[in-house]
Image (cartoon, helix red, strand yellow):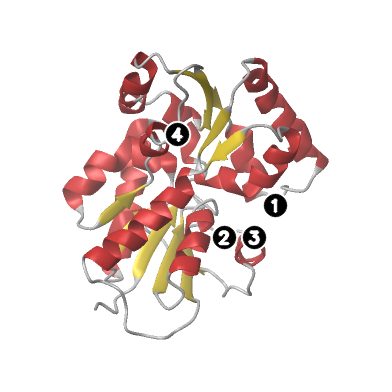
Amino acid sequence: MDNRPIGVFDSGVGGVSVLRTLLKLMPNEHFIYLGDTANVPYGTKSKDEIVRFSLDCAKFLKSKNVKMTVVACNTASNNAGLELKENFENIRLVNLVKPILAIELSDVKICHIGIIATEATINNENFRKSLEEPEESGKVKLFKKAGPKFVELVENNEIESEKANSIIKEYMEPLLNEKIDVLVLGCTHYQFLKNKIQEFAPNIEIVDPAEWAAHETFNELQTKNLMTSNRNNKFVEFYITKESSEFQKLTSNLLGFECPTPIIVDIH
């Protein structure tokens, strides 16, 4: 058993999608969530900036004596994963490729898979190379689309707005024109638009790597016997790197309980 907290970080509020699943799987764990609101979104930043920001976030969580750090950000996972693993122990990344490889494929039909992610993820060389295996199998065709406006919708609490409907249409129509069967959500922010995307495209399967990351974290903690012996239901601390008037409201709405006021910290 290990009663130390679990750290979770993202560029903003998007990683709360991972935290939400972690809380369902492990309601008695102590979580520390860090949103790097000073630098959101990561998806439009350079690789060097993403690496620097990610290392700073992980260093802050390490200072809180966490037993595991969950990088609840696809952009950070894809662009800074190697550096994070080299510098910190017990790092759990969001993996986009595993869910793609796990999609059930037909022997008689080529599966058309749409991937919507941030610009930094779409353009990342390692990410592109990691997709060569499914693409070369001849069983799938991959269609990639950058969706930076989705992050803004979530961060600005505009999920239920007409603006959201318009942007979903803008991003989804080109993918639907390619007759995609599956859509992979390549950013943890996007989970909060999942229901609206499904309403717009009811006939496609939506795959959410954020769910995979949460379940893999749970499995790893169990395997390493790192689960807590405490019985503290929904014990979460929130930290942000820049004041955000929407953060507490968003996290409370997304998690379904009143979250504490986030503490502003200078980590960079």
At a point 61% along the width and 60% down the height, the residue shown is 247
Q: CA distance from mark 3 to mark 4?
A: 32 Å
Camera-side residue: 138 or 14? 138
Question: How far across and how far down the image is residue 110, in percent?
Answer: 49, 17
Q: Residue 226's image quarter?
A: bottom left
Q: Residues within 10 Å of mark 4 (few under 14, many from 20)?
A: few
Q: Earlier in the sequence, mark 1 or mark 4?
A: 4
Q: CA distance from mark 3 to mark 1?
A: 7 Å
Question: How far across and how far down the image is residue 138, in percent?
Answer: 39, 13
14 in relation to 233, above or below:
above
Q: Say the numbered circle drawn on residue 250.
A: 3
Which amino acid, mark 1?
Answer: Asn
Q: CA distance from mark 1 to mark 2?
A: 15 Å
Q: CA distance from mark 1 to mark 4?
A: 31 Å
Element marked by disc 4: loop
Q: Earlier in the sequence, mark 4 or mark 2?
A: 4
Element marked by disc 2: loop
Element marked by disc 3: helix
Q: Are marks 4 and 2 in contact (CB under 8 Å)?
A: no
Q: Which residue is mark 2?
A: 243
Q: Say the numbered circle drawn on residue 103.
A: 4
Q: Earlier in the sequence, mark 3 or mark 4?
A: 4
